[in-house]
Amino acid sequence: MGFVLQDGATGTTAEVDSAQRLSTFSITEPEDKHVNKEGRVWSVYFTVTPAGANDYFFYLKNTGTNDLFISDIRISSSVASTIFYEVVSGTPSYITGTDITPTNRNLGSSQVPTATVKYDTDITGLTSGGVIFFEECTTANQRYKISTSSNIIIPQGKAIAFKREAATGAIECVVSLIGQT
């Protein structure tokens, strides 16, 4: 045994061995569950039929001060297509610009992310800063999923947009969005 750490106020102790490992009895919970218990995990669901080939159809901009994270995206297309998830800049221009109200995954929480979240048939005025991911939707009406443990991190003032390559077809999508404390 190495030494014992002791809380001066309560007298609670923990041992540290010679390999500098803390020895405790603990209960762990996945980080995503912990964050959800705090009311900071949302589902962003929408369906849209983009007007044409290579049209942006989804836009999310962080208008708050804390980072937002996308952990995964579930998507299907009614026709085979490639979907591009891109970092974008510029001022979006919409045909109708339908706002999306994210659904909190903690049914007891009313928290909402501070963000502009919209879908549309053709969002213009954006400049691509690069492709973050792409998804090959090779089979019509099949759900595809991108999941990234590193997350897509969206700092204050930054934005992401989704673009479909095919000229026709409907998109159904849910984005898993996480807020930072």
Image (cartoon, rainbow, N blue to C red):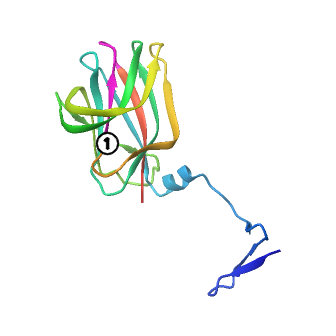
List x then y, in percent, for residue 37: 51, 55
List x then y, in percent, for residue 69: 42, 46
Q: Which residue ends up furthest to the right in the rendered image?
A: 1
Total numbered circles: 1
Q: Residues within 10 Å of mark 1 (few under 14, many from 20)?
A: some
Q: Is residue 169 left or right of residue 52?
A: right
Identify the residue at image location x=43%, y=22%.
76
Is residue 122 highlighted in magenta? no
Quadrant showing the C terminus: bottom left
Q: Nearer the viewer, residue 100 or 83?
A: 83
List x then y, in percent, for residue 17: 78, 71
Q: Which residue type carries mark 1?
A: Thr
Identify the residue at image location x=27%, y=27%.
56
Q: Which residues are magenta?
A: 159-170
Dividing the picture into quadrants, the one containing residue 60 is top left
Question: Mark 1 highlights which residue?
Answer: 101
Q: Is residue 154 left or right of residue 20?
A: left
Identify the residue at image location x=79%, y=75%.
2
List x then y, in percent, for residue 7: 65, 82
Give the answer, above or below, for where 45 lies relative to 121: below
Q: Which residue ends up furthest to the bottom in the rendered image?
A: 8
Quadrant showing the N terminus: bottom right
Give the answer, above or below, for where 180 lies relative to 2: above
Q: Is residue 37 left or right of residue 121?
A: right
Callout 1: helix, strand or loop? Answer: loop
